[in-house]
Amino acid sequence: MNYYELTDDINFPNRWYLGDIAFADNWELSQHLDPEREYEIEVCRDGSEMDYTCNEAYGVSVVSKKFKEALSSVADIEFAKANIVGKKTDSEFYIMAVPKELECINEEASEFQKFKVNDPVRPDKAGEYRGFFKMVVNPKKCEGFNIFRVKGFSIAIVVSAKVKQNLESAGVLGAQFKSV
Protein backbone atom coordinates (compact mmCIF):
# COMPACT_ATOMS: atom_id res chain seq x y z
CA MET A 1 0.00 0.00 0.00
CA ASN A 2 1.12 3.55 -0.68
CA TYR A 3 1.36 6.18 2.06
CA TYR A 4 1.33 9.98 1.95
CA GLU A 5 2.22 12.80 4.29
CA LEU A 6 -0.85 14.99 4.79
CA THR A 7 0.02 18.67 4.78
CA ASP A 8 -1.71 22.03 4.68
CA ASP A 9 -1.52 23.69 1.23
CA ILE A 10 0.50 26.83 2.00
CA ASN A 11 -0.03 28.04 -1.59
CA PHE A 12 -3.84 27.84 -1.42
CA PRO A 13 -5.14 31.03 -3.12
CA ASN A 14 -6.22 33.79 -0.72
CA ARG A 15 -6.08 31.33 2.19
CA TRP A 16 -6.97 32.04 5.76
CA TYR A 17 -4.52 31.59 8.62
CA LEU A 18 -5.77 30.32 11.96
CA GLY A 19 -4.26 31.16 15.34
CA ASP A 20 -3.90 29.28 18.59
CA ILE A 21 -6.71 27.27 20.09
CA ALA A 22 -7.88 29.40 23.04
CA PHE A 23 -7.56 28.08 26.60
CA ALA A 24 -5.92 24.80 25.58
CA ASP A 25 -2.45 23.26 25.35
CA ASN A 26 -1.99 23.44 21.59
CA TRP A 27 0.91 20.96 21.63
CA GLU A 28 -1.32 18.39 23.30
CA LEU A 29 -4.29 18.94 20.94
CA SER A 30 -2.61 17.47 17.88
CA GLN A 31 -2.66 14.05 19.54
CA HIS A 32 -5.31 14.16 22.27
CA LEU A 33 -8.42 16.24 22.81
CA ASP A 34 -11.67 16.23 24.73
CA PRO A 35 -14.35 15.26 22.17
CA GLU A 36 -17.07 16.70 24.44
CA ARG A 37 -15.50 20.14 24.56
CA GLU A 38 -16.01 22.97 22.06
CA TYR A 39 -12.74 24.71 21.27
CA GLU A 40 -12.31 28.28 20.05
CA ILE A 41 -9.85 29.41 17.42
CA GLU A 42 -9.28 32.89 16.03
CA VAL A 43 -8.52 33.86 12.48
CA CYS A 44 -5.05 35.46 12.27
CA ARG A 45 -5.54 36.52 8.66
CA ASP A 46 -8.89 36.37 6.96
CA GLY A 47 -9.22 34.66 3.63
CA SER A 48 -10.80 31.65 1.96
CA GLU A 49 -11.88 28.79 4.21
CA MET A 50 -10.06 25.51 3.75
CA ASP A 51 -11.35 22.03 4.52
CA TYR A 52 -7.94 21.20 5.96
CA THR A 53 -5.62 23.69 7.59
CA CYS A 54 -3.11 23.72 10.41
CA ASN A 55 -2.90 26.53 12.91
CA GLU A 56 0.14 28.78 12.68
CA ALA A 57 2.45 27.87 15.53
CA TYR A 58 1.51 24.37 16.64
CA GLY A 59 0.30 22.53 13.55
CA VAL A 60 -3.06 21.60 15.08
CA SER A 61 -5.31 20.24 12.32
CA VAL A 62 -8.56 22.14 11.81
CA VAL A 63 -10.98 20.42 9.44
CA SER A 64 -14.38 21.10 7.92
CA LYS A 65 -17.46 18.95 8.29
CA LYS A 66 -16.86 17.67 4.72
CA PHE A 67 -13.35 16.51 5.68
CA LYS A 68 -14.62 14.88 8.89
CA GLU A 69 -17.41 13.06 7.06
CA ALA A 70 -15.00 11.79 4.38
CA LEU A 71 -13.09 10.01 7.17
CA SER A 72 -16.11 8.75 9.12
CA SER A 73 -15.14 5.10 8.47
CA VAL A 74 -11.48 5.56 9.44
CA ALA A 75 -10.32 4.52 12.93
CA ASP A 76 -7.65 6.21 15.08
CA ILE A 77 -8.91 9.80 14.69
CA GLU A 78 -10.56 12.05 17.26
CA PHE A 79 -12.66 15.12 16.46
CA ALA A 80 -14.02 17.94 18.63
CA LYS A 81 -16.07 20.97 17.60
CA ALA A 82 -14.13 24.15 16.85
CA ASN A 83 -15.77 27.56 16.81
CA ILE A 84 -14.05 30.02 14.50
CA VAL A 85 -14.11 33.30 16.44
CA GLY A 86 -14.81 36.53 14.59
CA LYS A 87 -15.73 34.99 11.24
CA LYS A 88 -18.98 33.66 9.86
CA THR A 89 -18.09 30.36 8.20
CA ASP A 90 -19.86 28.32 5.56
CA SER A 91 -19.11 25.03 7.33
CA GLU A 92 -18.81 23.55 10.78
CA PHE A 93 -15.19 23.07 11.83
CA TYR A 94 -13.46 20.55 14.06
CA ILE A 95 -10.10 19.98 15.69
CA MET A 96 -8.66 16.68 14.46
CA ALA A 97 -6.34 14.70 16.70
CA VAL A 98 -4.34 11.70 15.49
CA PRO A 99 -3.12 9.85 18.61
CA LYS A 100 -1.56 6.77 16.98
CA GLU A 101 2.23 6.98 16.50
CA LEU A 102 4.19 4.40 14.52
CA GLU A 103 7.91 3.76 14.39
CA CYS A 104 7.86 3.41 10.61
CA ILE A 105 10.68 5.41 9.00
CA ASN A 106 12.94 3.62 6.55
CA GLU A 107 16.11 5.44 7.61
CA GLU A 108 18.24 3.94 4.82
CA ALA A 109 15.99 5.44 2.14
CA SER A 110 15.18 8.71 3.97
CA GLU A 111 17.18 11.91 4.30
CA PHE A 112 16.83 13.59 7.69
CA GLN A 113 18.50 15.29 10.63
CA LYS A 114 18.11 14.29 14.27
CA PHE A 115 18.46 16.35 17.41
CA LYS A 116 21.78 15.70 19.09
CA VAL A 117 22.51 15.18 22.77
CA ASN A 118 23.02 18.61 24.38
CA ASP A 119 21.27 20.34 21.47
CA PRO A 120 21.29 24.07 22.34
CA VAL A 121 17.67 24.55 21.24
CA ARG A 122 15.89 21.28 22.16
CA PRO A 123 18.05 19.04 24.37
CA ASP A 124 14.84 17.26 25.43
CA LYS A 125 14.46 15.87 21.90
CA ALA A 126 17.87 14.18 21.62
CA GLY A 127 17.65 11.28 19.17
CA GLU A 128 14.33 12.40 17.66
CA TYR A 129 13.95 13.63 14.09
CA ARG A 130 14.59 17.35 13.65
CA GLY A 131 13.40 17.43 10.05
CA PHE A 132 13.21 15.50 6.80
CA PHE A 133 14.55 16.36 3.38
CA LYS A 134 13.06 13.08 2.12
CA MET A 135 10.74 10.91 4.22
CA VAL A 136 10.23 7.26 3.33
CA VAL A 137 8.10 4.93 5.44
CA ASN A 138 8.40 1.16 5.62
CA PRO A 139 4.95 -0.01 4.42
CA LYS A 140 5.27 -3.27 6.38
CA LYS A 141 5.43 -1.27 9.63
CA CYS A 142 2.32 0.70 8.61
CA GLU A 143 0.22 -2.25 7.53
CA GLY A 144 -3.35 -2.08 8.81
CA PHE A 145 -3.19 1.62 9.69
CA ASN A 146 -4.86 4.35 7.65
CA ILE A 147 -3.80 7.45 9.58
CA PHE A 148 -0.99 7.95 12.09
CA ARG A 149 1.85 10.16 13.24
CA VAL A 150 5.54 9.36 12.85
CA LYS A 151 7.16 8.33 16.14
CA GLY A 152 9.99 10.75 16.86
CA PHE A 153 8.53 13.37 14.48
CA SER A 154 4.97 13.68 15.68
CA ILE A 155 4.20 16.79 13.64
CA ALA A 156 3.96 14.56 10.54
CA ILE A 157 0.61 12.94 9.77
CA VAL A 158 0.77 10.01 7.36
CA VAL A 159 -2.29 8.62 5.58
CA SER A 160 -2.94 5.53 3.48
CA ALA A 161 -3.99 5.57 -0.17
CA LYS A 162 -7.53 4.80 1.08
CA VAL A 163 -7.66 8.01 3.15
CA LYS A 164 -6.17 10.03 0.31
CA GLN A 165 -8.81 8.63 -2.07
CA ASN A 166 -11.66 9.37 0.39
CA LEU A 167 -10.53 12.99 0.78
CA GLU A 168 -9.97 13.54 -2.94
CA SER A 169 -13.36 11.99 -3.78
CA ALA A 170 -15.01 14.36 -1.29
CA GLY A 171 -13.31 17.31 -3.00
CA VAL A 172 -11.69 18.70 0.13
CA LEU A 173 -9.76 21.95 -0.24
CA GLY A 174 -6.41 22.72 1.38
CA ALA A 175 -5.07 19.18 1.83
CA GLN A 176 -1.88 18.14 0.06
CA PHE A 177 -0.44 14.64 -0.20
CA LYS A 178 3.25 13.93 -0.59
CA SER A 179 4.25 10.34 -1.30
CA VAL A 180 6.35 8.87 1.49
Image (tube, helix red, strand yellow):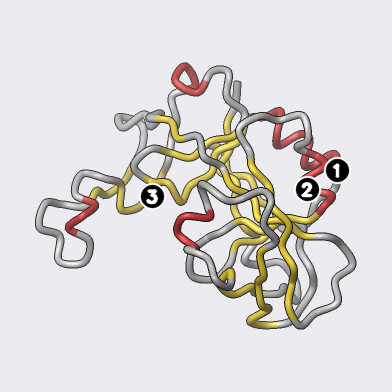
Marks 2/3 in contact by CB < 8 Å: the verdict is: no
Residue 40 versus residue 113 in the image, above or below: below
Marks 2/1 in contact by CB < 8 Å: the verdict is: yes
Percent coordinates x, y for residue 116 in the rendering:
15, 52
Identify residue for label 1. 170
Instruction: State the residue at coordinates (38%, 50%).
Output: 133
Q: Which of 35 and 147 is in front in this view?
A: 35
Q: What residue occupies the far left of the structure in this picture?
A: 118
Inspect the image, locate mark 1, and give the three-letter code of the amino acid beneath it: Ala
Inspect the image, locate mark 2, and give the three-letter code of the amino acid beneath it: Phe
Percent coordinates x, y for residue 1 in the rendering:
60, 20
Instruction: State the residue at coordinates (38%, 46%).
Output: 153
Q: How crowded is mark 1: few (under 14 residues within 10 Å), some or many (20 or more)?
A: some
Secondary-structure class at tag 1? helix
Inspect the image, locate mark 3, and give the three-letter code of the amino acid beneath it: Phe
Q: Nearer the viewer, residue 94 or 125?
A: 94
**Left or right: 175 as drawn, with respect to 27:** right
Identify residue for label 3. 133
Percent coordinates x, y for residue 158 in the rendering:
55, 38
